[in-house]
Image: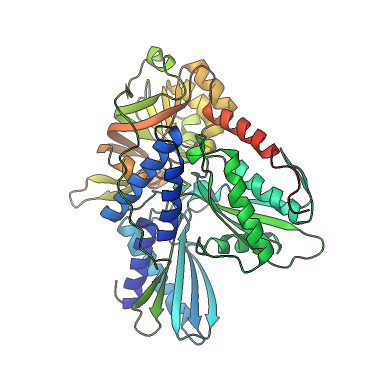
Amino acid sequence: MSTQMQESLLELITQTSTNLPPDVRRAIKKAQLQEEIGTRASIAIDTIVDNIVSAEEDVQPICQDTGMPTFIVHCPVGFNQLRMTEDIRVAVEEATKLSKLRPNSVDPLTGKNSGNNLGAGTPVIHYHQWERDEVEVRLILKGGGCENKNIQYALPVELPGLGRAGRDLEGIRKCILHAVYQAQGQGCSAGFIGVGIGGDRTTGYELAKEQLFRPLDDVNPNPTLAELEQYIMDNANHLEIGTMGFGGKVTLLGCKIGVMNRIPASFYVSVAYNCWAFRRLGVVLDATSGEIRSWLYRDKEEKMERPTGGFSTDQAIVLKAPISEEQIRSLKVGDVVLIEGEIHTGRDELHKYLMKHDSPVSLQGGIIYHCGPVMMKDDAGEWHVTAAGPTTSSREEPYQADIIEKFGLRAVIGKGGMGAKTLAGLQKSGAVYLNAIGGAAQFYARCVNKVNGVDFLDEFGVPEAMWHLEVKGFPAIVTMDAHGNSLHKDVDEASLLKLEDLKDPVFA
Ligand code: SF4
């Protein structure tokens, strides 16, 4: 790193990735108090808090998915934006080398990961000029699990549970509630939503994402939107989707809504969903020296204590590969398990590969982990895990049942649950789906004792490679068993009924 500006930007990236802002912490602490001790939601939220504390202490990524780095820069007239872009690129590359960012920039045609978070369209940088003499840089790191739960509605539209959403405030209200419902636990709830009303398909989504930069405790200057935000916050928790979609009292932690003009033919409501790992920070920089003058979102400090709750391991069932079919069939939804021994990471590229090829290692009786870890190689050439929470499992739905049957897998670890095809596959082959706590990347990295090896590193890149990890005391909850039961299906159905309760007009 050669310039002060680059150093300051590296500090912004590091802090954003590792240290949740105070307003987000306050929202999570409030939710922690609302959940009943000992429930699945309470276990999940305590694990999240434990993870937040570890990430700050160790200056490591809160979640392994550090998303698409998106910078919003305000600068004085005449400021050199070309040089700033280069400074941001240098800082992003350095943060990736230091494992504060996971290499996340992938060519969609070749599947090649650039390895340094630089590439076409990466990172995202938006510039705005202003009359002040200083530079403000805001950054959001929004991971794929929640990005995939963004949704855009073109009104009028028919919505499950809510009926017709027309081109008025009532229709907007229904779209926002539906957006929370459809995310279930897959975006690592409890979440935050930014909503953009109006615009076109592109600017509507931009407006929605912009809302995520608002402090959680601000009040919308538009009284109609302020009332709508309050309504959503008061009612979304009625859905009882809960943390990780386990069911629970808290489903939504924040809602911010913006509006812009539309053209007569189009009426969009765009929703940007952000997981609990709501990583956004900002700095005000001296335009000449590049030094940090002040931080944004850090007006009031909010310390978090390591919780005493979380997984109770006393009655947990130990699973160690190779696992017998008999042991798997004795498990039921709700059981807490502790995984020991070797597990193998596998995401989209590996699942696609295994459909047509052999596995480089035996998976008979084995455990696959939907995870794209952050890894670091030491001077001796040894790999170490620095962040390793689960990724969204539903992406593997087209493959999972076939892979389980073909290789004799007994357990799949992930988050957010899987669908009907996998559920039938679990029943047929004798396997279970284990839900780990999404985003708890430091918590789970602590459970990895050793990296036994890696396959497909050059072909697939770090997140998609098949890492062979030796784990100890790795806790998870059975959420889909070998008897056709699925907690995810149950929570989805129950929350749809709850959504129907909110069908009647409120703003008519
Ligand atoms: S907390 Fe969940 S949704 Fe958020 S970035 Fe991490 S894995 Fe993705």
Q: Nearer the viewer, residue 286 or 201?
A: 286
Image side of residue 489 versus residue 262, left or right: left
Residue farthest toward the top in the current orientation of the protein: 326
Residue farthest toward the right in the current orientation of the protein: 264
Whether 12 is drawn above or below 52: the answer is below
- Residue 202: x percent and y percent? 66, 61
Which coloring applies here?
rainbow
Q: Nearer the viewer, residue 352 or 17?
A: 17
- Residue 37: x percent and y percent? 40, 35
- Residue 243: x percent and y percent? 48, 40
Image side of residue 506 versus residue 489, left or right: right
Whether 287 is drawn above or below 356: the answer is below
Residue at 28 percent of width and 37 percent of height: 447
Residue farthest toward the left in the current orientation of the protein: 380
Q: Is residue 117 visible?
A: no
Image side of residue 318 versus residue 68, left or right: left
Residue at 54 percent of width and 77 percent of height: 128
Image side of residue 272 versus residue 434, left or right: right
Q: Nearer the viewer, residue 204 or 404?
A: 204
Quadrant position of the N terminus in the picture: bottom left
Whether 468 is drawn above or below 459: the answer is above
Q: Which image quadrant is residue 219 in?
A: bottom right
- Residue 29: x percent and y percent? 41, 49
Q: How many marks?
A: 0
Q: Is residue 193 visible?
A: yes
Q: Which image quadrant is residue 366 in?
A: top left
Residue at 60 percent of width and 39 percent of height: 239
